[in-house]
């Protein structure tokens, strides 16, 4: 399966519910979305290690740390871009 298809599936199945949860809690700042995206990126990377059966081979070497930084950074950047497009802090809806 192409990686883009996996990325879109994760964005729709996990990213949108996270957006709604953040919005309903009133956490609409850019930092909230960036942090949630970074956590999601790390969780997806570790779940790929678990599904792939490579969890016992994870070491703190430069390749694992590079993969973690890439996952956290790219999903955090995607969440920040989503925030810039949607702007949940400016939509005028009240959650209180």
Image (cartoon, helix red, strand yellow):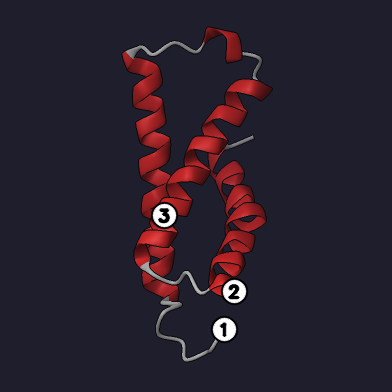
Q: Residue furthest front?
A: 96
* Residue plotted at (59% across, 74% down): 24
Q: Is residue 75 above or below residue 65?
A: below
Of 92 and 8, the residue lying toward us: 92
Between disc 2 and disc 3, whose residue precedes? 2
Q: Which numbered disc, 3 or 1, marks the residue closer to the eye?
A: 1
> Looking at the figure, which quarter contains the C terminus?
bottom right
> Looking at the figure, which quarter contains the N terminus?
top right
Q: Is residue 65 above or below residue 93?
A: above
Q: Position of residue 51 (x, y in %)?
A: 68, 24
Which mark, residue 24?
Answer: 2
Q: Position of residue 26 (x, y in %)?
A: 51, 74
Graded by Cα atoms within 10 Å as few (under 14), some (14 to 19) or many (20 or more), the crowding at tag 2 reads few
Residue pointed to by mark 3: 78
Which mark, residue 95?
Answer: 1
Graded by Cα atoms within 10 Å as few (under 14), some (14 to 19) or many (20 or more), the crowding at tag 3 reads some
Between disc 2 and disc 1, whose residue precedes? 2
Confirm or deny contact between disc 2 and disc 1 (CB under 8 A): yes
* Residue plotted at (56% across, 37% down): 44
């Amino acid at each position: 399966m192409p990686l883009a298809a996996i990325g879109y599936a994760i964005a729709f199945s996990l990213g949108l519910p996270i957006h709604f949860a953040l919005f309903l809690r009133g956490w609409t700042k850019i930092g909230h979305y960036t942090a949630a995206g970074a956590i999601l990126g790390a969780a997806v990377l570790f779940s790929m290690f678990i599904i792939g059966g490579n969890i016992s081979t994870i070491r703190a070497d430069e390749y694992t740390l590079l993969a973690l930084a890439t996952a956290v950074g790219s999903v955090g950047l995607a969440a920040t871009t989503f925030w810039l497009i949607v702007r949940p802090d400016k939509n005028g809806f009240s959650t209180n």
